[in-house]
Image: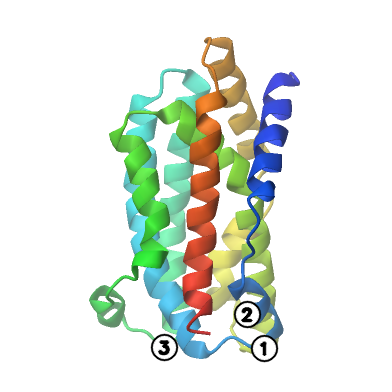
Amino acid sequence: MGHDEQDLLARVRVEIQAEGGENRLVPLVASGAAAPRALAVLAAEQHHVISSDWRAFLALAAQATEPAEREFFTALAGGEGLATAKLADFAAACGLSPDEVAAHRPLPGCQAYPSYVAWLVLNGDPHTALLAILANFAEWGGYCAAIAAGLREHYGFDDAGCAFFDFFAEPAPDLDELGLRALREVLASGWSPERAFGPARLLHGFELMFWNTLAELA
């Protein structure tokens, strides 16, 4: 594996961190301080996110011009599909019926993230989406690990109730490697990544907005 794609990711992550901001919800769940209502809204909002991202990743796979890039987005879509049933178990553990999840009115602050992923699809820019998603990958897994631990320790959730977060917290070295290979192929095609730094920062900001909108309920 070459160094160009790794150096690029490191540069983007430095820029993202320089923007500041913090996830205020995850520490509340990890410590048991979050209200159960916030967990229920998290489940309902994630239902909308998963549904949107699943379609978006398939569309990005269709737009991708490099084989590994197409494979990466296809793998992401497959993960969203697998996570759907696990998310239903989390919602049930939060006391929500399927009808209540369906009736939930999404919060703008929570849906900015998937809306922006869909914006990247609409603008036909899978390379930018690839870099932005990879740059934000590691944080999502860490958030899920902390939430799963908090749900077990403080809220009495069983393995089924935590399975959604366990799934994304589990290290995925093959997927990480595939993402780096995709980025290497894209760079080798002559694509210039500089204009993708802004979208990567936006995606990170929208993710923080998701969590912090929920933190206001917690």
Q: Earlier in the sequence, mark 1 or mark 2?
A: 2
- Could you tell me which residue is drawn at 59 percent across and 82 percent down? 158
Q: Is residue 35 above or below residue 185?
A: below
Between tags 3 and 2, which lies in front? 2
What secondary structure is marked by label 2? helix
- Could you tell me which residue is drawn at 33 percent across and 53 percent down? 52
Label 3 Cα neighbours within 10 Å, binned few <14 / some 14-19 / many ≥20:
some
Mark 3 lies on residue: 95
Q: Earlier in the sequence, mark 3 or mark 1?
A: 3
Name the side, left or right, on which 64 lies relative to 163.
left
Residue 213 percent coordinates (x, y): 47, 72
Residue 10: numbered disc = none
- Would you say the residues marked 1 and 2 are in contact, meaning their CB atoms lie under 8 Å apart? yes
Mark 1 lies on residue: 154
Q: Amino acid at mark 2?
A: Val
Label 2 Cα neighbours within 10 Å, binned few <14 / some 14-19 / many ≥20:
many
Q: Earlier in the sequence, mark 3 or mark 2?
A: 2
Q: Is residue 185 above or below residue 32?
A: above
Label 1 Cα neighbours within 10 Å, binned few <14 / some 14-19 / many ≥20:
some
Q: Amino acid at mark 3?
A: Gly
Give the spatial CA distance, label 1 vs label 2: 8 Å
Residue 29: numbered disc = 2
Q: Nearer the viewer, residue 137 or 125?
A: 125
Q: Nearer the viewer, residue 145 or 116?
A: 116
Give the spatial CA distance, label 3 vs label 2: 17 Å
Q: Does residue 30 appear anywhere in the picture?
A: yes
